[in-house]
Image: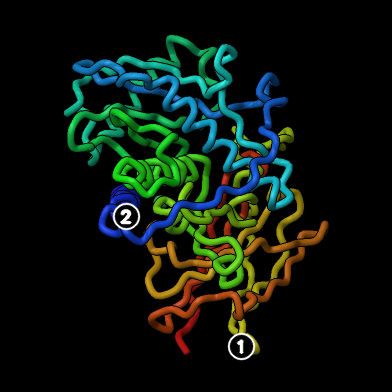
Amino acid sequence: MMLRHSAVACLLAALAPFAHAAETEPQKRPEAQPAVTASEASPLPMLNVIYLVPNDMEPLPGHRERLGKILLEMRDFYNRELARNGSPARLRMPLDPQTGLVALDEVKGTHPLKGYPYEGGWKTALPDVEAHFKAHPERKRSDRTLIILPTRGKPGVPFYGFGTSCFALDYEGFDYKDCGKDTPEGQKFKPWYGGMAHELGHGLGLPHTHATKSQAKELGTALMGAGNRTLGFTPTFLTPGDCAFLESSPPCRVFEPRPLRKAEGFRPDIRREGGTVRVTGRLPEGATVRRVVAAYDKDDFGSVNDNYDAESFVVPFGTDGRLDFAFPMEEIHPGRTGKVQIQLRLIHDDGTVELIRHTLPEV
Ligand SMILES: [Zn+2]
């Protein structure tokens, strides 16, 4: 099951830094650009931010201030990266007019903490959130929801993203003041902060991706690669492909989507040619494809978590829908094997993604 694989890999990646605490160095943080706030007051869709409190718990001390600040920083990271990539999209979250921090929508759960385990806990969490939106339809600001659960002791709550929802956690003392610090608190903060930003990426529609060779050199680690272990500590970035997805994601997009019309019958030609892989074809007329992202996935593929190693590229296409793209092989890290699968994602206006997989013959 996709979710199961996704969940496990994301958590393992999140926990890994505990073993490598000594390797990290505090990062010189990039110059902050002006925060995007103008659109917050507009009726454009926003991310729903839910704080789901199990019925045997209370919110953790200072949760509104701590998470409000963490989420504001996370939003600004996304928006700096969208701007750096030249994208007009901006991630919108509800703000508390009093504090200017991201506002949490608190929901009392119908189960005790143990009713929301890591494995399968989403099945009890989602109905609680759905019931909340049914009772308070005005609080549903889009179809995308980040659900944060407080933890006690060893964290064991859902921590993954799939479909239109994503899950992260709160622990006592989870505080942005520890971001970038090489202290025990900083090391604890790192995977849960980076992890939350990474799972949020999934909730907004992003697949995994790896930095290309020049991105790795110039920009560091892709958030949707191993960025859940680096955000706020060492350079971490969003790829142009990530931004192509975000542009159509409801809490980010800045245009009115056309009613979905899929690319019925689109069969691109994908082949090895002259030392590269070339993709040619023509998108059907009338299809609402806004962007095309091609991924070069090595070694293993099939499961959602096999593409951490896949470099991705935005494929340009003309007004007539024609595309002709050759992967820049100098940007692609070698795989362990000769196995390669090309994944073409057709991103529609409304955020719907059509996935075309093509496994190349081994050379
Ligand atoms: Zn992931």
Mark 1: secondary structure: loop
- Tell me the residue at 52%/20% (across/down): 140
Q: Is residue 88 left or right of residue 124?
A: right
Inspect the image, locate mark 2, and give the three-letter code of the amino acid beneath it. Pro
Residue at the right extreme? 319
- The residue nearer to you, when weighing 359 against 57, is 57
Which of discs 1 and 2 lies nearer the camera? The answer is: 2
Q: Position of residue 179 (x, y in %)?
A: 44, 41
Q: Is residue 53 left or right of residue 273?
A: left
Inspect the image, locate mark 1, and give the three-letter code of the amino acid beneath it. Gly
Q: Position of residue 280 (x, y in %)?
A: 69, 72
Which label was assigned to residue 275? 1
Mark 2: secondary structure: helix
Q: Mark 1, residues whose alpha carbon is within 10 Å: few (<14), some, or many (≥20)?
A: few
Q: Which residue is mark 2?
A: 17
- Tell me the residue at 39%/57% (across/down): 24
- Which corner quadrant of the image does residue 53 belong to? top left
- Tell me the residue at 45%/85% (across/down): 362
Q: Position of residue 155 (x, y in %)?
A: 23, 37
- Tell me the residue at 32%/59% (across/down): 22
Question: Marks 1 and 2, how far apart in space?
Answer: 37 Å
Q: Position of residue 143 (x, y in %)?
A: 52, 29
- The residue nearer to you, when weighing 77 against 30, is 30
